[in-house]
Amino acid sequence: MLLIGDFPQTIISKKPKMTNKKEKSKTAKPAARCKICGVDKKMMALIAIAVVAIAVIAVVLLMPKGAPARNPAPPTSPGIPPAPAHGTIAVQVRDSATGASLEATVVVMSAADDLAVASQSSASGQATILVSPGNYYLKASAAGYASFDGINSTFSVTAQGTTQQTIRLEPTISPGPVSGGLSVKTLTSSEPVVYPTPEGNYVLSLMGAQTIEGMGVVDVTLEVATPDGSIEQITAGISGIGVVGDMTVTFLNGTSASDVITGEQSFSAQLELCYKC
C-alpha cells in the first residue's frame, strides 16, 4: 500500500507565456523634418503652395490694363474693283427758233446698256448730270415742243471730265406776231400752248376756270412761263385783261365739261394774245 508520500515527486515547470504579435505595442515613427530649420516638411509644402498662389494673384492684379480694342477694319470683298470716278454732262436746252432757254426734261441714255438717268433742267435751261465714264446720247422734251432724240449723236464722258451739250427743240405751234399784232390761241386744261416772241417764248397753261350757271366759263386762271424763266399766275375774263411782261391776255370764250364716270372737270378757253400792243 502506497502512501501519498511515497509517490515520486514530479517537477512541473511553467512554460514561459507567449506574447501575441498583435498585442505588441507599436511605436509611431517621428515626422520627417527639415534638417536645417526643423520644420515639418508637409507644412513647408503647404506654405510654398500658398506663397505661389499669392504671387500669381498679385501679378494679375498689378498687371497694366491693355489698350482698348480698336474697331476692326470693315471687311473687304476680294475681287471687286473700286467704283470708277464720275464724269459730268452739262446740258443747255434752247428754243431752235429764238435761242431762248427752255425748262425741259433731259434724259441721258447709255449707248452701251440703254441705262437712263433723268434730270429736270432749271429755269435757265441748264441741267447737270453725273454719270460713269462711257458713251451716251440725249433725249429731251418740253411742253409745246417736239421731243428730241439724239440716238445718232453719241458722245463720250471721261472720269472727272465735263462734256458740254446743247439741245435745240422745235416748237410745235406756229410763231405768233414778230412785233405787235394779235394772236388767238385755244387752251385746254390738259395741253399748254407756246406763244413765241422776239424776246423768247411765253408758255401758257390753263389752271382753272370760273363758271356761272347759264353763262358757262366767264373767267380763267393761267400759269405763264416767261422768256426770262420766271413763272407768273394771271386771270382773264370778267376780272379783266391779264398782263404778264410785254404780253396781254384777253378772254374771248370758254367751255367746261364733266366726266360722267370720274366726275373730273375739264376746261377750254379761247384767248387773244397780244405782244407789245
Image (tube, rainbow, N blue to C red):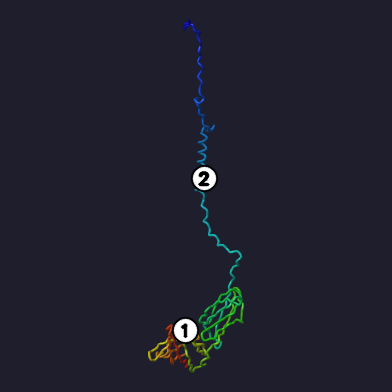
Q: Residues within 10 Å of mark 1 (few under 14, many from 20)?
A: some
Q: Is residue 54 above or below residue 85?
A: above
Q: Is residue 144 above or below residue 114?
A: below
Picture quadrant where residue 222 is located: bottom left
Kind of residue at badge 1: Ile
Which residue was labeled with disc 1?
Answer: 231
Kind of residue at badge 2: Val
- 30 and 84: which is toward the camera: 30
Pointers 2 and 1 in contact (C-beta within 8 Å): no
Residue 230 in picture, x, y percent from top left: 48, 83
Q: Which label was assigned to residue 56?
A: 2
Q: CA distance from mark 2 to mark 1?
A: 84 Å
Which of pointers 2 and 1 lies earlier in the amino acid sequence?
Answer: 2
Q: Kindly identify the residue that appears in the image at 51 percent across and 43 percent down.
A: 53
Query: Residue lying furthest bottom in this view?
Result: 181
Q: Kindly identify the residue that appears in the image at 52 percent across and 38 percent down.
A: 45
